[in-house]
Amino acid sequence: MRSLTLGLFVGIYGITATTAHLAVFTKGMWCENGADGTNVNSDDPVTPLYELEQDQWWFHAVNGCNKRPPADGDILNLPAGQSITLEVAANQGVTSLSFGGKYATAWPDGHNYADDYNVPTCIISPNMHTQNQSMAAGTALAIAYVSDINQVTPSNLVVFSVAYNTPWKLDTTYQVPAAMPPCPEGGCICGWGWIPNGCGQSNMYHQAIRCNVTGSTSTTPIGAPQAPVWCEEDPSQCVNGPKQMLYWHQASGSNIEVDGYDLAGGPKSPGYNMKCGFRNGAQDDIFTGSGSSASSSSSSGAASSPSPSPSSSSSSGSSSSSSSDSSSSDGAAAAADNGSGVSSADNSASSTAAASSSVDTPTGTSAAVAAVDTSAPQTDNPSPTPSPTPSPSADADTSSASSVVTSASLASGAPARQCRPRVPPVKRGEEDSAGVHRRRHRKARRHHGDVY
């Protein structure tokens, strides 16, 4: 009995003592209880995705998360016109999904910190890839109106909600557009994503969730999404209307590349904020006919369902279950923050893009780009006795914080540079044969070589 108790303690200690990354944990997610379906301490969805082939990073196939579908009946409900609150954490063991929430706190790793938590170099415990809340890059939810995960691709997975200044605390609130149409029988497939704002390795996070829109009063379909572009310097170049999720720094399948420095003086890093045209809150411009284009044609048809990808397995249909609907506990961001990880003083050149951490219903700006049509590549209840947590896959994320080049250190001498075209040549506002706005990535940017 004593050894069992000791084992439980060691397992739980491993949850909170390790430096992990962050992912969303909710009923309806793929990879609940880990890729093998038995680990209530799992951090499998938390593994960073970096320089992988598309069939490996898509819905976290690299460690089999896309093969572990939710249990029958588990689904994330999306109440049209309301909000949902999800848990973003370093490990399932510190969420309400495990141990009855016994080890959960207000923070993602089960510990407690001051509300004004700030580390000038980089917060690495929990590993949020930010210096403080005002610099958090933003997270997003997207939806595909298909019930089979094999049919989800970048060209039908549309961002519908963005939460500025996240990830931060455990509870993260997302606004659902009021005009969301109902899902097909069996529900929809949602995606959750995050790209950190520098402060460590330039990785990303991408998860699948079975979801269902409730309380629909509209049948207007969502339009085909377009690849976002970097538009901090000129908001008129932001993509208007439905947008794809951001896919960055992968061996294949990336849909955005940036070069140079942002207006704050730090290396450019795409994120779910106005630097890439994402407004805070519900994305109300995603429906057919709601977007327009100033300099290139936009797609007005409903998002298509391209052919299945080779590396994911189909999921079974699910029925509805309840989701939480509460206000965010993240608290207000720092006064100097504009909601996109850039101080107001440094962002005066793009004041139209500024937004607070409160909900900001988007109206869109202008130039749209052609949609990308690239193919993409799912639980039994766990044993009540947890298994020890595997070391966080911070695999490549372990170098010291002292090596990070911060925005402050670059602001004094680094001129802002425009993105340069890549082969084949493209100009700003134009796209290559795949319809993707591409920018050269300079390997010399040591900032993005640092990892945690």
Image: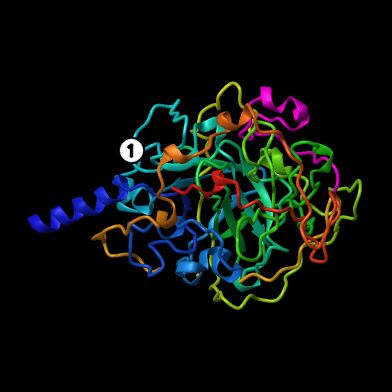
Q: Position of residue 283 (x, y in %)?
A: 71, 45
Image quadrant holding the N terminus, namely bottom left
- The image quarter in which residue 385 lies: bottom left
* Residue that mark 1 sits on: 111
Q: Is residue 120 left or right of residue 234?
A: left
Farthest left residue?
2
**Residue 345 colored magenta?**
yes
Residue bounds of the magenta highlight: 340-367
| Image side of residue 225 versus residue 133, left or right | right
In this picture, residue 431 sits left or right of residue 345 = right
The residue at the point 45 percent across, 25 percent down is 116
The count of marks equals 1
**What amino acid is labelled 1 in the image?**
His
Decide which of 323, 143 is in the foreground and name it. Answer: 143
Q: Percent from the top left, x then y, of residue 381?
A: 35, 65
State whether residue 313 appears in this view. yes
Q: Position of residue 328 (x, y in %)?
A: 52, 35
Q: Position of residue 401 (x, y in %)?
A: 43, 39
Residue 185 lies, with reference to residue 244, above or below; the image says below
Graded by Cα atoms within 10 Å as few (under 14), some (14 to 19) or many (20 or more), the crowding at tag 1 reads some
Which residue occupies 32% across, 59% down?
390
Kindly report the secondary structure that dominates the magenta region of the rendered protein: loop
Q: Is residue 72 visible?
A: no
167 lies above or below 389: above
